[in-house]
Structure formats: C-alpha cells, structure tokens
Amino acid sequence: MNQIRMIIALFIVCGFMPLSSLAFRYASSLDFDYDEINDEIALYQLRELLLISYDLEMTRDCLYFRYQDKDFRLSVVNGKLILQPGTQIFLNGVDDLYFDEMNGCIYVFYEKEEKSHNSVIAQRHGIHLDGFSHCAVSGDEPDDDEE
C-alpha cells in the first residue's frame, strides 16, 4: 500500500515539474521596479513626520515646517527631495517636483523617469501651537494657594 502511494506521489510531482518550470520562466521575465516601492515607503515616512509637525508653510518648490521646536525645510536639491537641516533624502532621481494644495491637503507632484506621480503628504492646516498651553509640563503653573 505504501509503494502505491509513493508511485502516485512520484507521478504527481513529475506532472507538476513542467508547470513549475514554466511558472519560473514567466516570473523571471517580469520587470519589477523597486524604485516605486522605495518612493512609497519614503513618502509614508514623510507623512509620519509631517503628521506631528506644525506651522506648515508651502511654496511651489519648498515646504517649511516646525518639528520638535526646530525649523525644517523640504526641497529639491540636485534631483533629490531632501529634508534640511541635515540631509535626509526622501526621493532620489527626481526630474521635476513641486508642492500644491488641493482640498485642504498638501500634495507632492513629481516626475521620475518620464512618469508622473502624485501623493498626499500632509493636511494644510495641521497642528497650531496657539491651541496648547504655554506650560511644557503639567504642574509647572503655580497654584492660587501657593502664592
């Protein structure tokens, strides 16, 4: 009985061998662009950063904002979308890039290798510090009883 099962399994495996070689040949000829995936990951990280940033100011070619009490600028330098001060590269090999506002959201439009891409990166009116207390830590304000 075990020999019959072994022979049937061998026939099944031999039957799938030509199909698997055709599948591998087809999959190897697919052109996969890792740059698009890397760009999406980088834009996701940029969205995360801009989500907790505040005082966003936008021009066509720059995005200014405050993050952790420091001023930052997002702009294109030598075909790269760079966060300054410092050098954190989000997009590489960009031919043209500009920022625009639509429906209360800030979009980044860019061309790369003759393909146009766009993505939402932030809300236009994010966090404004005027709505928060001037006190950094609760308990720093003197109580009326202490005076």
Image (cartoon, rainbow, N blue to C red):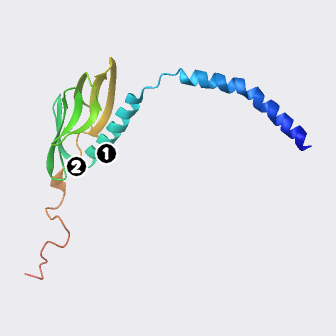
Residue 139 on image: x %, y %: 18, 73
Say which of 8 and 112 sits in front.
8
Q: Nearer the viewer, mark 1 or mark 2?
A: 1
Numbered tag placed on residue 8 in the rendering: none
Q: Is residue 13 visible?
A: yes
Numbered tag placed on residue 48 in the rendering: 1
Residue 35 on image: x %, y %: 37, 29
Mark 2 is on which residue type? Ile
Is disc 1 surrounded by few (<14), some (14 to 19) or many (20+) residues within 10 Å?
Answer: few
Q: Secondary structure at mark 1?
A: helix
Q: Quadrant of residue 19?
A: top right
Answer left or right for 146 relative to 119. Answer: left
Give the farthest residue toward the front. 3
Say which of 94 and 1 sits in front.
1
Q: Is residue 105 visible?
A: no
Please tell me which residue is depicted at 12% across the width and 82% down the height of the picture: 145
Q: Quadrant of residue 94?
A: top left
* Figure quadrant of the C terminus: bottom left
